[in-house]
Amino acid sequence: MMDAMEVKLQTLPRQVAGVLARRIASSGVTGGQGPSEQQILQEFGVSRAVAREALKILASLDMIEIAQGRRVVLRPAEEWDYLSPLLIDWLPPEQMREILAEAHATRIIIEPAIAAIAAKHMTKENLERLGTLLAAMSASEDNADAYLKLDLDFHMEICRAAQNRILDRFMYSSRWWQMASRRISNQMPHALPSATEMHRAIYEALLARDAKRAEEAMRRHLKITTAVGLPP
Amino acid sequence: MMDAMEVKLQTLPRQVAGVLARRIASSGVTGGQGPSEQQILQEFGVSRAVAREALKILASLDMIEIAQGRRVVLRPAEEWDYLSPLLIDWLPPEQMREILAEAHATRIIIEPAIAAIAAKHMTKENLERLGTLLAAMSASEDNADAYLKLDLDFHMEICRAAQNRILDRFMYSSRWWQMASRRISNQMPHALPSATEMHRAIYEALLARDAKRAEEAMRRHLKITTAVGLPP
DNA sequence: AACATCCACTTGTCCGATAAGCTTATAGGC
DNA sequence: GCCTATAAGCTTATCGGACAAGTGGATGTT
């Protein structure tokens, strides 16, 4: 049962799935045969139940395809579930950076549109929570971790106002991207005060229910964040 | 082991997960205790392995949370994975219609932006494939099923040109939404010729690498589709 | 060469047992 | 009486072995 020495951070199937996923993602091979239950048993020394669950995890990420009687096959990488926090963590560094850059590009498309819609649907409660978050951000500019959490909540609160569960889901995934992004690039503590200013600009546009202004404020905010936080 | 009479369309865990998911989605309850392994064993008469896999499926949709020693808990419906084709099929009709409407609203946000980006990245191969698809659509206007597949491929091909795997993933999910949408509303055979015209307008804008025009053509196309294909 | 049969391999499902973690209740000490 | 600590009982995690069911290729026949 793997190495008894190592600390148990995650469930066994997830650890096995992680090793397999990294291997698949690094190899770049696609379309061929994937790992079979038997191979996993022998290589990792785990029970068949664990091997099966590990494969099920990879299947839920659309990395492999499982069918009775047939061998596991590797699915094309273009269709993997890059919205899953699991997959993000298992990608090799270069691919991870690429995905995070693409995720940010997608934010620049979606979030201004969200802000525009939200401006028209904002309730008093939404605005109150945004105001509270803004004050907390202003007071947390010396704590990058706390600030990030408030930042994420701020954007999520705006999305909630747009009342669209598909967009909600996108923002939910965005949470993991940004946490991963911060893990690999620990800079931008100096940018926090200016970030608060930009958030305030968004807030005030929403307060005035000015869709155009909210959209533009959000776009400016995200474009500047690109230049600061991510590699070219 | 359930009813031996019924045909085996899907794997057993998935069937069980479907029943449980429908029950959870219909009840509207959230935050409380979810189904335990023992309860599933007794109610469905399946083995523990099947019960566990069924729960794992629900967990992969973010519908429940599983942890050793603790009982399964129901997660808030706002964070379910509405991008999954499984969940879509398991929602009660009203919720399904709501989600499909929200999905279409999201398409109107994202796809025009995709078209604008794609216009600048279009390769000769992309344009050739689009042209082929367009011709096939024109010849399939009497076959709604075939037309839908070509339609989906057309939009996907444009997205591919934008070279963004997050957007790719979104379009991949969009595939299931539209197939579900067609399943519940079987109209719009008369709209196919005009749909081809709109697709051609998009194609020509891309051919001219005119981002603004492609964006606007895509937006018009999707807005008209809204009025025809979905309930208000 | 075409076709039917059989066999080996793979995944699906079942059963029973032990380990590990959490919650609650109970017993003890203060 | 209140608090703490231990223990009991529930939950999920992992193991091992067995058989069923489906697929694909090898085999063999016509």
Image: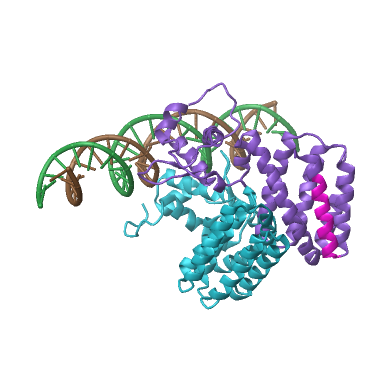
Chain colours: A cyan, B purple, C green, D brown
Point 70% across, 39% down: residue: B180
Residue B152 appearing in the image? yes
Residue at horizontal 77%, vertical 62%? B118
Q: Which residues are magenta?
A: B209-225
Residue at image location 79% in from the left, 42% down from the top = B148
Q: Position of residue B169 (x, y in %)?
A: 66, 54
Residue D24 in which image quadrant: top right
Q: Is residue B106 left or right of residue D18?
A: right
Instruction: Say which of B30 and A62 sits in front.
Output: B30
In the depicted structure, whether residue A117 falls above or below residue C14: below
Q: Position of residue D22 (x, y in %)?
A: 59, 34
Give yes or no for residue B212 being in the magenta stretch: yes
Give the image quarter of residue A200: bottom right
Is residue A112 or residue B126 the one in the foreground? A112
State left or right for residue A187 relative to residue B169.
left
Vertical order, B78 against A6 (above or below)? above
Residue A147 point in image, percent of width and height: 49, 67
